[in-house]
Amino acid sequence: MRDHLGRPLVAVTGIGAVTSLGFGVKDNWSRLLAGQSGIRRITRFPTDHLKTTIAGTVDLPNDEGLTSPVRVERMAGMAIEEAVGEAGIGSKGAFPGPLFLGMPPVEVEWPTRFDLARRAHDPSYAAMTKQAEGRRDVYETFLYGGVGERLAARFGTRGAPISVTTACATGATAIQLGVEAIQRGECDACIALGADSTVQPEALIRFSLLSALSTRNDDPAKASRPFEKNRAGFVMSEGAGALVLENYETAKARGATILGLVSGAGERADNFHRTRSNPDGRAIVGAMRNALADAGLEPGDISYVNGHGTGTPENDKMENFGMRAVFGESAPPISSNKSMIGHTLSAAGALEAVFSLLTIRDQRLPPTINHDEPDPSITLDVVPNVARDATVRHVLSNSFGFGGQNVCLVLSAEPA
Amino acid sequence: MTPRDVVITGIGLVTALGEGPEAHWDALSAGTAPVVDNETYAPWPVHPLPPLTLDRQIPKKGDQRQMEPWQRLGTYAAGLAIDDANARGLVEDMHLIVAAGGGERDLALDEQVNAELADANNGARLNELLATGLRPTLFLAQLSNLLAGNISIVHGVTGSSRTFMGEESAAADALRIAHARLAEGRGGIALVGGAMTAQRWDLLLLYRGEDGLWQGPHRPLSQRGQPGMVLGGMAGFLVLETEEHARTRGARILARLDAVASNATRRAAPGEAATSARALLPRVAPQGVDAVISGATGAPGAWEEEEAFLREVAAPVRRPASLIGHGVEGAFPTHVALAALALHRGGFYAPMDPADPAMDPEDAPARVLVTGFGQWRGEALATLSRAES
């Protein structure tokens, strides 16, 4: 079976999710539909002197002192395990296709610098570097390719693992890379995922310096307020979302259960500013339109949009603008999972693709919670506060990143 | 669907030897000595970047201030490639894949925090020092995807933007996927490349962990008794086009990019990486090659594997890392750019390492293999061939 451009259809046969709402797709989805928030006070490290002391943290077993790449690897591993298990493909440790991993940048972190400086009795980089002799643990933990290599080894994926970052669009880019690999016949199956564990002091401070984070620390569950009048920044979160993508025909031939299709992907980069969209909305509008065109759909075919909806004043205003430009007066409802799980950064695009597929499966739209006071400049139906039933065949999932990297996906029901 | 042929129409090249095709062709075809700084980071030598006239490619001072050396270098070299391809008017629909590490940290702040807190285990005080010490712009200058972001902002490249991470492999796969996307008709023109700055302790610290850095005054790869890398600042960017796109606009074609293939074995036993590359060879060079540009990093393990592989490729080898050092994410695209340059000039390079055999200057290769054995993981091969004018 081929799409309108003669390419193989790309099916999703397994999904996995880890967020601050829980481990596994089932718990996450039921809590999202119930409008629960996973945002809470940070307890993993001291938060004195931080402007933001809340986050959507994931409490991993024995996670004391784990560095970000190790946490990314653990959450990614959980999500992949769930997705591959559901897909029932390959055998243990032998997945029949490549790995596309969306993840955050990596660098040596404070505990390691302190350890090296302490051992060297000298705070300088020259001394730390000398002291790093024989520290394969430092090297392998903080190499950019380290997480991907270890996941590839564990799940036995084929070929070179691809690690990708496009800021907040990362998870969607990973899926897009996987979709393209199947469409061009490089593989019949692959794993695409996004994972993130950026919640640590230095990262919180960096994002605070950009005035990007909500500081509504007193009431964590109320802090993430996408599309609402009093929104004042996003809430940083952790998590992982994974998908097993397959050539629809080979998936059907092996009797796999089809969760849905990734029927289109579109991207467009912005050249306006490092942290803001061009006021003309060109890039986000272009990404949405490119995704629709790639899927061979008209705007009227989309019955729900899983929004980027970060809760920053800027993003939500631009997303509303872009939606109106693409969909006109009859824009479909849009909601933001980030109102409940916060902004999982590199994982967001993949998690939101997972939840878009579940929206189609259950014909039920997850809400945008914390919608207390409508913003007159947000004119869309944001599915305020309460989930509701709807007829949904095609979902557009938006991901817009810092640095102007925008990716939109179209998730669709299995062909009748 | 018949895959479209892909050609290289522009290269942006910066190494310790200088910038641009002329400087590199002149130095490397005649034979040259490396530019090395043996002292600043002793006992680890590095190849420093040449002075760059940033204003020529990054005209706004405001843009320059938003970056640190790594992003400036990459953005600069990307601009050189766009100019070399005469493609300034095509940036709006140009696709972009960058291979990236991360930007420079504030080393002085790190050392100051270390001095106070290394023995203290005081998270609250760490927060305080960082909250007052970190500069807002530095975060953006550190972000991996912001090299691509800056290329979009400064040069207007907006077709798409993807950033691959993962050292040498990231760059090879960036090129492989950019090539594959053009070949299947996703766009007509793409910019792909990577950059690395070597003059930074934070990277030396990381690579030191494997004991993979060569210690002591610079020596060429084959003369290092104990294998080890010498880092070299470099950037390589390539403008790729479908041949049809290039010919329609009358672009000068430097070379054909015939094929790119990659793999990553676990390297659990000696010989695995060489076997992995051997399996890729028929996919990229079914008819053999006339010359090789080796991506040898000098890293222990990878060095022996690649040498074993090269012995079976019956073609003369050039090992650029002996002259320009190892450029991690910048290495593979720089080496591909050098291959394209040689094919365009109708000649080849003088030996770069004592192990490189002499060649008859008249004996211009028509097909060149570029190898990439990652310092830790990843095997990649690319082949380029001469384009008929």
Image (cartoon, rainbow, N blue to C red):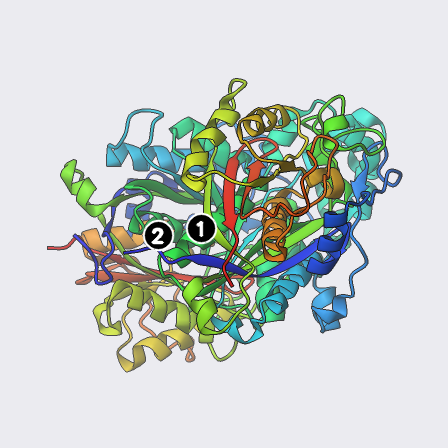
Q: Which mark is residue B353?
A: none
Q: Quadrant of the N terminus of chain B?
A: bottom left
Between the C-alphas of marks 1 and 2, the distance is: 10 Å
What percent of the width, then of the height, locates residue A188? 27, 41
Q: Is residue A140 left or right of residue A59?
A: right
Q: In the rendered picture of this protein, how many numbered marks are placed on residues?
A: 2
Which chain is home to disc 1? B
**Mark 1 and mark 2 residues within 8 Å of each other at the beta carbon:** yes
What percent of the width, then of the height, locates residue A230? 49, 69
Task: Give the answer, above or below, for where B141 lies relative to A192.
Answer: below
What percent of the width, then of the height, locates residue A381? 31, 72
Q: Which mark is residue B177?
A: 1
Which chain is home to disc 2? A
* Mark nearer the viewer, 1 or 2: 1
Q: Which residue is mark 2?
A: A180
Compare residues A128 and A34 and report the one nearer the observer. A128
